[in-house]
Every structure is written in structure tokens, then in C-alpha cells.
Image: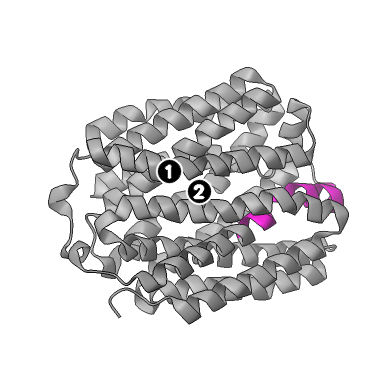
Amino acid sequence: MTLAVFLLTAIKLVLNAGFRFVYPFLPAIGRGLGVDLGQMGVLLSVRWGAGFTAPLTVAAVDRVGSSRRLLVAGLISFGAGSLVTATSGVFVGALVGFAFIGVGKPLFDIGAQTYVSERVPYRSRARSLGILELSWAGGFLFGAPLAGWLIDLWSWEAPFWVFGAIALIALGGIALVLEASDSHHRTDTERRAQSDAAIVPFLVAVTIAGFTLELVFVTLGAWLEGSFGLSLAGLAGVGALLGAAEFGGEGVMVGFTDRIGKRNSFAGGLGIAAVFLGVLALVNTEMAPALIALFMVIMSLELAVISAIPLATELRPARRSRFLAWFLVAAGIGRIIADLIGPAILENTDMTAVALTAAGSALAGMGVLFASVEEPGR
């Protein structure tokens, strides 16, 4: 598993970088495409909305192969979407490219999570999946500075060229390293029946968590540019700072989530985020305090969101990859809502309203989890 996890983490790092670098540079990419922030929000919504195809595509791949097929399909779609976006250079082309990226990213993520979950018992799964998900923070730490440098040196299309090409090259590594079959690795936990009572509340909490996180990110670049006049280099630096915050949240998951319980870690992260979102609402016009509060918000939300992943892998173990697809759909619904209304909230009010809205949604998600979701096996 060591080489497999290393390979999957490295590839996910590249895909996450290609997926996430756009947030600090939404205004710059919008200027390149000749559109405003609201239309960029539509692009992001299309990208998340394309992930709604995951239940269908995962079900189709499940009938003809293993999690490795999901990984291959995800890489092809992601790479093609990135190259289409870079080649077209217009809004319609970017719309198509973002849709392909939105299809490919969840396919790869589900494939990687399934590959690991089939081989690791639930009691220690948060640690293993947490190591895999370190690539999410790494995507910002690595992707934001690199993308800023590429945009400054060439143009807004350059990061899409780079990340798309690497995604297609990674197909060779998947073919050489990973096993073709999952079936003989499945643990006996897969045969344990799970209650239906926790399924809908869990997906509701995931939707709320996705909304909360995306509401912060979709308004981030415009808020920082408008309030503090940050340049591309400054935005890249903030991106690296937030990547460090996410890395901290993932580190907490690796070290403690298996011990305290996946549900408690999910709910606790939302509760802590709500507190610091309240702080951000008070200090968002002062740069240093605002960045400190933002760091803690992102760290806490990252802990919450990734703690939900190992919990999701055991709520429907007999249909693990398919339930993970619905997990991503639920998160995507929340993100789409945030992408559509977040820019409008910021443009019509200010960052205080954004932070308070996010704080309220985080508290609601925590309440749903404690009231209606139990840890599997307890």
C-alpha cells in the first residue's frame, strides 16, 4: 500500500492544484475571459454541477471494472477539460472545460478513496484517508504560488496547460502501480448492515458544510483585492497561507479523528469554524486580524469536511463508491448555492454579512450531526 498511497497522493496533489488555484485568481481569469465575477461564479457552479453525474458514471464503471477504472476515467476527463479551457480562451470554451474538470475530479477522488477503503479497516481508516487528503491542502500550497507565477509570466491559460498535461501523463503511473481488482481486499465490515436513519441527515450536514466552505472561498479573491488591494503575488501568498491552514486541519484528522470518532470530528470542526467566522465578521477590515481569523476558519472547516469522508465510507460499505458519489453530490449542491449567492452577498453588502451567513450555516450543520447521525458500529 505504501507505493500505491504515495502515487495516489502525488496525483491528487496535481489535480487539486489544478482544481483549486482558480479561487484567488478569479478576477484575473475573469479579465482574461472578458467576464465579471458573477459570471465566474457561474463557471464554478457548472464545475461543481458537473459532479452530479458522479452517481451515474460511478455506477457505469462499477459494472465493468474496479476502482482503478474510476481513476483512469477521472484523469482523462480532468486533463481534457483543462486543455479545452486553455485552448479556447473564451467563456463558452471555459464553460465546457470546467464541466469536464467537474466530471473528472470526483471520479478520481472516489476511485482513490475506494481503493484505500477496501484495503484499510474502519478503525484506522481516517488516518489512511487523511494522509491521502493531505494533497488537498498541498494543492493550495503548491498550486496557488505556481499558478500566480505562471499567470504573471505568461497568461491566465498557463496553469490549465500545465496541470492538464500532467494529469494525462499520470495515466501511466496508474497502469503500472495499482492492482486491477478490489474484491479480494474487501473487509468483513462491508457485510455489516447499516441503519438508514443516518443517511439523509448525514447528506444534509455534508451539503451545509460544502455551502459554508465555498461561501468563504468564492468571495475570497474579490474581498482581498477590494479591501486590501492585494496584487497577484499577494493573492498567491494568501493562497499558500490557506493551504497551510488546511494542512493543519488534515494533520489534526490524521492524529485524532480515529480516536475521538469521525462524527465528533466532523461536528467539532463545524462548531470551531462558526466561532472564528464570528470573529472574522468583526475584524474583516483589518488585514492582520482578518488573516488570522481566516486561517482558523479554513483549518476548522477542512477538519470537518475531510472527517466526513471516512464516515461516508462506512455508512454504505457494500456500495461504497456509489455512496461516495452521492456524498460528493451533496457537497456539490452546497457549493453551487454558495457560488451563486456568495458574490451577490459580497457585492450588495460586505464581508461581515458573508462571514455571519457562513457562521450560521456551520452551526446548523453541527446541530444536524449531533441530533441525527451516529458513529457506525456504536
- Depth check: 377 or 271 in front? 377
**Type of amino acid under label 2:** Gly
Magenta span of residues = 213-229
Q: CA distance from mark 2 to mark 1?
A: 24 Å
Q: Is residue 42 visible?
A: yes
- Depth check: 223 or 378 in front? 378
Q: Is residue 1 above or below residue 100?
A: below
Name the residue: 65% across, 63% down. Answer: 295
**Type of amino acid under label 1:** Ala
Q: Which quadrant: the C terminus?
A: bottom left
Name the residue: 49% across, 80% down. Answer: 370
What secondary structure predominates along the stretch shown in magenta? Answer: helix
- Magenta segment includes 346: no
Name the residue: 49% across, 75% down. Answer: 369
Disc 2: which residue: 138
Secondary structure beneath label 2 = helix
Q: Is residue 210 above or below residue 8?
A: below
Name the residue: 46% across, 41% down. Answer: 53
